[in-house]
Image: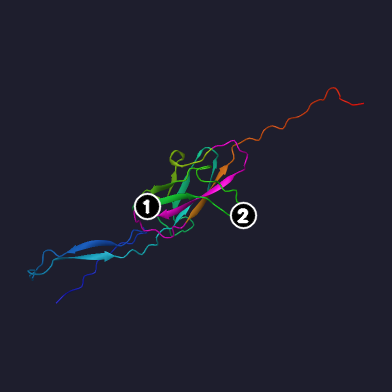
């Protein structure tokens, strides 16, 4: 003979994965538990939508460090902060294609792969310029140049949705064109006979 017991779970809006709790039978009256297990585990299936990860485009003056913002759930009203840290691995890359003034890795910027942590219960984090992506100054007048940053993994295995996001960083040319000489007056003349 057995009896089914319902246990009420509570709804939340956090994409946290399935959770497990233990149900323990205590203080039995009118029966004997000898030889029986007095506890069992139950699993709560998470019904929340996993937040997508997005990166924001940014501009930086040539020679300064670029910051990048990583966002959970942007453009997706159902996206919620995670209840655990989310570690996002990013990598810079060269863009190519017609009409693009592409920045060259290790010439215009320092190529790097790095991790960014979005703390638990936060929706975004911005990598400050001190820890950002280094761009290199030069004296060339070359116009603005562009390179990319992409998500290449979630090292800590946090549950997230889409994570193939890419962003561009535009390096604004910091070089000043030389001044154009002007002629205020011309004195004297030269002639041939």
Image position of 36 with respect to 178: above or below: below
Q: Quadrant of the C terminus?
A: top right
Residue at the spot x=24%, y=69% of the render?
6
Q: Quadrant of the N terminus?
A: bottom left
Residue 156 in sight in this render: yes
Disc 1: CA contacts within 10 A as few (<14), some (14-19) or many (>=20): many
Front in this rendered view, residue 11 or 60: 60
Disc 2: CA contacts within 10 A as few (<14), some (14-19) or many (>=20): few
Image position of 176 with respect to 13: above or below: above
**In the displayed image of the protein, which residue is found farthest to the right?**
193
Horizontal and vertical percent position of residue 106:
50, 43
Residue bounds of the magenta highlight? 137-164
**In the displayed image of the protein, which residue is found farthest to the front?**
193
Image coloring type: rainbow
Residue at the spot x=51%, y=38% of the render?
64
Task: Identify residue for label 2.
Answer: 98
Horizontal and vertical percent position of residue 87:
37, 51
Image position of 106 with respect to 189: above or below: below
Disc 1 to disc 2, how far (Cα)? 36 Å
Residue at the spot x=57%, y=37% of the render?
138
Local secondary structure at mark 1: strand
Whether residue 177 is in magenta: the answer is no
Horizontal and vertical percent position of residue 47:
36, 64
Task: Identify residue for label 1.
Answer: 86
Whether residue 158 is in magenta: the answer is yes
Residue 143 picture quarter: top right
Residue at the spot x=69%, y=32% of the render?
179
First reached walking from the N terminus: tag 1 or tag 2: 1
């Amino acid at each position: 003979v057995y009896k089914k017991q319902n246990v009420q779970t509570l709804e939340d809006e956090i994409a946290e994965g399935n959770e497990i709790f233990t149900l323990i039978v205590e203080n039995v009256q009118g029966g004997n538990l000898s030889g029986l297990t007095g506890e069992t585990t139950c699993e709560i299936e998470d019904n929340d939508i996993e937040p997508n990860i997005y990166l924001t485009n940014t501009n930086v003056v040539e020679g300064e460090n670029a910051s990048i913002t990583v966002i959970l759930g942007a453009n997706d009203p159902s996206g919620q902060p995670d209840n655990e840290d989310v570690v996002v691995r990013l990598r810079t890359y060269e863009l190519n294609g017609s009409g693009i003034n592409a920045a060259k890795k290790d010439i215009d910027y320092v190529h790097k792969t790095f991790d960014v942590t979005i703390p638990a219960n936060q929706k975004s984090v911005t990598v400050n310029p001190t820890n950002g992506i280094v761009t290199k100054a030069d004296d060339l007048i070359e116009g603005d140049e562009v390179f990319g940053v992409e998500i290449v993994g979630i090292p800590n295995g946090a549950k997230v949705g889409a994570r193939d996001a890419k962003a561009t960083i535009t390096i604004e040319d910091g070089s000043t064109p030389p001044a154009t000489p002007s002629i205020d007056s011309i004195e004297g003349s030269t002639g041939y006979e």
